[in-house]
Image (tube, grey):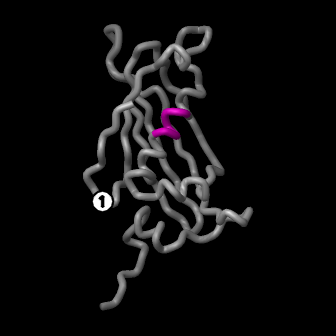
């Protein structure tokens, strides 16, 4: 997979490219629905890495996911996935995503899937969502953290 970099800091999105591999397809010859989820999760990890939050990934479980499948992807086709921060709540963060199949075999670029997912902040020894700590909040939603008085 290749990685494009968001020039804004902290970044609000991440984009990755990959090829549809044979293992991504099903008996019908097009992508299996689970491939979309893998590409989205890989892109999500890329965004956490760009934000410097990779070590917090285990404490940010996904609690909801919606995927709309809109077009088929084929073996060997390039796929571009983008994940964006949509909203930050007191204990949750909602992302939206798009997965595009690039031009392939004479066909134009097409959106193959889009959707959203929500993750929450859960401390390692807890089972309930807890408010975002300021160090995470300043990276995912810097405008909500009060500036430090000098």
Residue furthest to the right: 127
Nearer to the camera, 65 or 61: 61
Residue projecting furthest to the bottom: 150
Point out residue 65 in the picture as x, y percentages from the top left corner. Answer: 61, 43
Q: Nearer the viewer, residue 137 or 65?
A: 137
Q: Is residue 95 above or below residue 132?
A: above
* Residue 105 x %, y %: 34, 8
Residue 56 sits above or below residue 27 on the image: below
Quadrant of the rendering where the C terminus is positioned = bottom left
- Magenta region, residue range: 38-42
| Left or right: 8 in relation to 65 | left
The spot of residue 68 in percent (x, y) is 55, 33
Which residue matches tag 1? 9
Does the segment drawn in magenta span residue 107? no
Above or below, 17 against 19 in this view is below
Q: Quadrant of residue 18?
A: top left
The residue at 42%/76% (across/down) is 145
Q: Residue at x 47, y 66 (%)?
A: 136
Q: Residue furthest front?
A: 55
Please tell me which residue is depicted at 42% across the width and 49% down the height of the picture: 47
Determine crowd level at label 1: few under 14, some 14-19, many 20+ residues with C-alpha closer than 10 A. few
| Total marks placed | 1
Counting from the top left corner in percent of width and height, residue 120 is at 61, 59
Which element is circle 1 on?
loop
32 on left or right of 81: right
Q: Residue at x 59, y 71 (%)?
A: 131
Q: The N terminus appears in which quarter of the rendering? A: top left
What main secondary structure does the magenta stretch of the protein show? helix
């Amino acid at each position: 997979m290749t990685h494009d970099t968001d020039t804004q800091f902290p970044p609000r999105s991440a984009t990755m490219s990959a090829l549809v591999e044979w293992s991504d397809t099903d008996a019908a010859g097009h992508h299996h629905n689970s491939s979309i989820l893998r590409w989205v999760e890989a892109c999500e990890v890329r965004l956490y890495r760009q934000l410097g939050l990779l070590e917090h990934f285990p404490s940010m479980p996904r609690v909801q996911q919606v995927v709309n499948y809109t077009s088929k992807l084929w073996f060997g086709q390039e796929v571009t996935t983008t994940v964006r921060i949509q909203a930050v709540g007191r204990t949750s963060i909602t992302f939206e995503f798009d997965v595009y199949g690039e031009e392939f075999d004479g066909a134009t670029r097409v959106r193959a899937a889009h959707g959203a997912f929500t993750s929450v902040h859960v401390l390692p020894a807890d089972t309930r969502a807890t408010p975002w700590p300021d160090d995470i909040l300043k990276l995912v939603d810097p405008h909500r953290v009060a500036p430090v008085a000098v």
